[in-house]
Image (tube, rainbow, N blue to C red):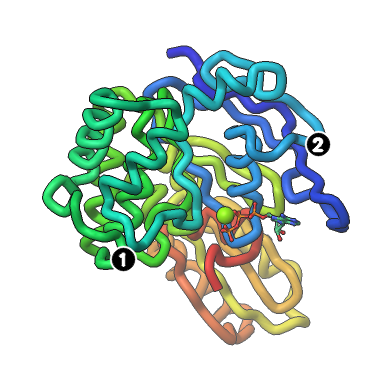
Amino acid sequence: MPNIVEANKLVKQYPGASTPAVRGVSFAIQQGEIFGFLGPNGAGKTTTISMLSCLLKPTEGSATVTGFDLIRQSAEVKRRIGLVPQDLALYPTLSARDNLSFFGRIYGLKGSDLRQRVDDALKMVGLSDRAGDAVETFSGGMKRRVNIAAGLLHKPEVLFLDEPTVGVDPQSRNFIFENVESLNQDGLTVLYTTHYMEEAQRLCDRVAIIDQGQIIALDTPKALINSLGGGIIHLGVPPEMPESLITHVERLPNVQSVAHTDGKMEITTQQAQHALIGVIEVFNEANVSITSLEILEPNLETVFLHLTGKRLRN
Ligand SMILES: Nc1ncnc2c1ncn2[C@@H]1O[C@H](COP(=O)(O)OP(=O)(O)OP(=O)(O)O)[C@@H](O)[C@H]1O
Ligand SMILES: [Mg+2]
């Protein structure tokens, strides 16, 4: 499959900011993929999407989108991408249909073609029966879906969805997932940003984990999770713990690696429950007490925690 997006060392330095928001991001999205950006608030997800949709000029680096150069061929790029921004932009007193007609005209659509595209887009997001109602009477999730429909009007080859489920009720959230999946099955490539690891895990073929403007891991959710083995054990330990104890833990069956910093021990395991039995024995024999214990199941949240020492959401 050809690459539909290729980003090469993109950098964005906002004027006056002390550090760049995006610091040399490179990745490729294959045609037909749902590609995820998973990262906490301020990671640089929106800034990256804004560069790829020609809303922001990169400070450094380059990219192609649908084979066209982001900077030299921006008109071609804009015609082929659909952007669903993080912030809703709808006219509350207008109906869903009139909102979409308005956006369609911006894309240069008119007449029966415009009407047809608006109807198709409303159908794709499951809002045909509410098409004539004012958007201000919609739930948060329904408004989101109107926004998604707006991004689909001109039949883009790739859709950029920026945190489409924030502030959305669970039912609408599921509806959005199903929409994204069925659009993807019909051939649409999707770049999906989120700070919910469950979403990245469920929807995305591959996920780039992004933090502080950099991609710190990129793979299928399965491979990312497998990289942690069978879970992580976090122990609180006394500051003056003997070094030999770490060696003993490292040698235990089911233990992959051990990291130790002041008062905390992180044990990456093949199977956390099994490893734990051995770990407790080692501590008992050395007569060292464990001050706290936490077992982290392998998931994308744990991968993030392992890579950054932080949680995705606080
Ligand atoms: N217009 C701007 N001017 C200056 N700094 C900005 C601007 N927009 C974003 N930033 C900063 O750039 C960094 C990345 O922000 P960005 O909005 O890309 O993150 P994000 O991953 O989309 O976060 P969120 O999950 O909160 O949407 C943050 O530190 C943010 O404060
Ligand atoms: Mg954002």
Q: Amino acid at mark 2?
A: Thr
Q: Amino acid at mark 1?
A: Glu
Residue 299 in view of the camera? no
Q: Are marks 1 and 2 in contact (CB under 8 Å)?
A: no
Q: Position of residue 274 (x, y in %)?
A: 39, 62
Residue 216 in view of the camera? yes
Quadrant containing the C terminus is bottom right
- Tell me what residue is drawn at x 24 percent, y 55 percent: 174
The quarter of the picture where residue 235 lies is bottom right
Residue 59, numbered circle: 2
Q: Is residue 254 above or below residue 80?
A: below
Nearer to us of marks 1 and 2 is 1
Q: Position of residue 168 (x, y in %)?
A: 33, 64
Near mark 2 (Cα within 10 A), the count class, few <14, some 14-19 or many ≥20, is some
Q: Position of residue 271 (x, y in %)?
A: 41, 56
- Helix or strand or loop: what does disc 2 sit on? loop
- Tell me what residue is drawn at x 52 percent, y 50 percent: 38
Mark 1 highlights which residue? 136
Q: Is residue 109 above or below residue 12?
A: above
Q: Position of residue 148 (x, y in %)?
A: 36, 44
Could you say which is closer to the camera, residue 104 or residue 149?
104
